[in-house]
Image (spheres, rainbow, N blue to C red):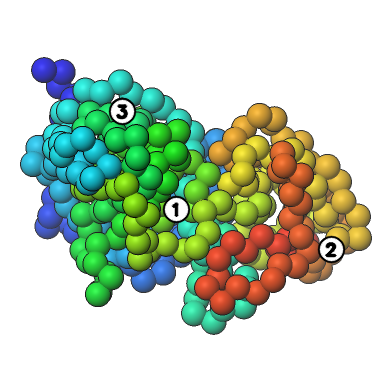
Amino acid sequence: MDRTALCTLGDIPPLSAHRGPIVKPLPADLFTTRGSSAETRWEAMAGQGYHTPNDRFFVGNHTTTPFIDAHSWRLRLHGDGLTGPRVLTYADLRGLPARTMDVAIECADNGRSLFGHRDDGWGLGGIGVARWRGAPLRSVLELAGIRPDAVDVLATGLDDPVGDRGHVRHVVPLAKALDDVLVAYEMNGVTLPPDHGYPARLVVPGWVGIASVKWLGDVEVSTRPLDNPFGTGVTTPSVKSAFELPRPARIPFGRRHVLRGRSWSGAGAIAKIEVSTDGGRSWRKAFHRRGTRAWTPWHLEWCPREKGPGVLLARAVDHNGYRQPEFTAYDKMGYLFDAIVAHPVIVE
């Protein structure tokens, strides 16, 4: 057997090293911790290339990162939407034809604090883009036989139950499940880290992060619509833009500076990015690489001519023509914030 086909406990931290709800280190220059989750600081993405490195990819946990042995892990496939039940081992999963995809995963409430919520909610760092590798969910389901009248797929994770709601789970319509959903076991070229779903997770392109269930252990296929207790009522993340700068950012006076950031849309590619360095009085088109789907890095040169505090603004338009608005309607759940965000700077 290929020695890479199985992952051993030696690939993950020992149990004695586990302290708190998240396994990996959370240095303050990379993350803002939020209970059982950790938000990426945007300045930590400066110079990091297209993909978010695993050591600074945000963590969205409902409870605690579990330790799961890949040798004993099993994926249970069942439901009246299949011709019969099936159980897959880790070796079975890795033995299927693989696909590699660049996909953004973003929390539905990324930007929640910008609505004015007073619960120390997320800024804009609840997103990351990785190169995921795994088996298409279609291939996994076909092993158990998909009935023609199947309509819904319910994926359930193996982390601890969340109160009376039970295990984290999410419904994906069968049409989406058979399209581009991945059962991933690698992230940026290495075995999935514990905090990001080891040994296997869903990756659902273009949908909010809760759909990309981590620590996948159970998949039900049904001929009737299924309840979705962890559903947010939204599927596609909205258009956003962020600067790769601290808040506030200190910028040298009278010297050329290259402003860098990223824009993204759950609906697909970004068509245009504009940046204002004067509080919105004027806008300049930023340079960006076209055709990138997960998110779009961009840059713009700026030589500040006045000292003192100010704000930078960035706005994007996706390929459907949706433009980031100046304001967005308040959402009591904090979902899908998409307004232009003022980024404070101090020129000195």
Q: Quadrant of the C terminus?
A: bottom right
Pick whichever, 251 or 147, lies toward us.
147
Q: Which mark is residue 279?
A: 2
- Residue 54's label in the rendered image is none
Helix, strand or loop for disc 3: helix
Residue extending farthest left: 72
Q: Quadrant of the N terminus?
A: top left
Q: Nearer the viewer, mark 1 or mark 3?
A: 3
The three-letter amino acid code for the residue at tag 1 is Gly
Q: Is residue 198 visible?
A: no
Q: Nearer the viewer, residue 85 or 149?
A: 149
Mark with earlier residue (2, 3): 3
The answer to whether residue 336 is above or below residue 44 is: below
Residue at the disc numbered 3: 139
Q: Is residue 148 above or below residue 21?
A: above
Mark 2 vs mark 1, foreground winner is 1
The image shows residue 236 at horizontal and vertical percentages of 56, 51
Q: Amino acid at mark 3?
A: Ser
Could you tell whether 154 is left or right of 253 in the image? left
Q: Position of residue 67 (x, y in %)?
A: 17, 52
The x, y position of residue 145, in whole percent, is: 24, 31
Q: Judge the density around disc 1: few (<14), some (14-19), many (≥20) Cα neighbours within 10 Å.
A: many
What residue did someone put label 1 on?
A: 209
Left or right? Give the position of 80 relative to 118.
left
Tag 1 or tag 2, which sits nearer the N-term?
1
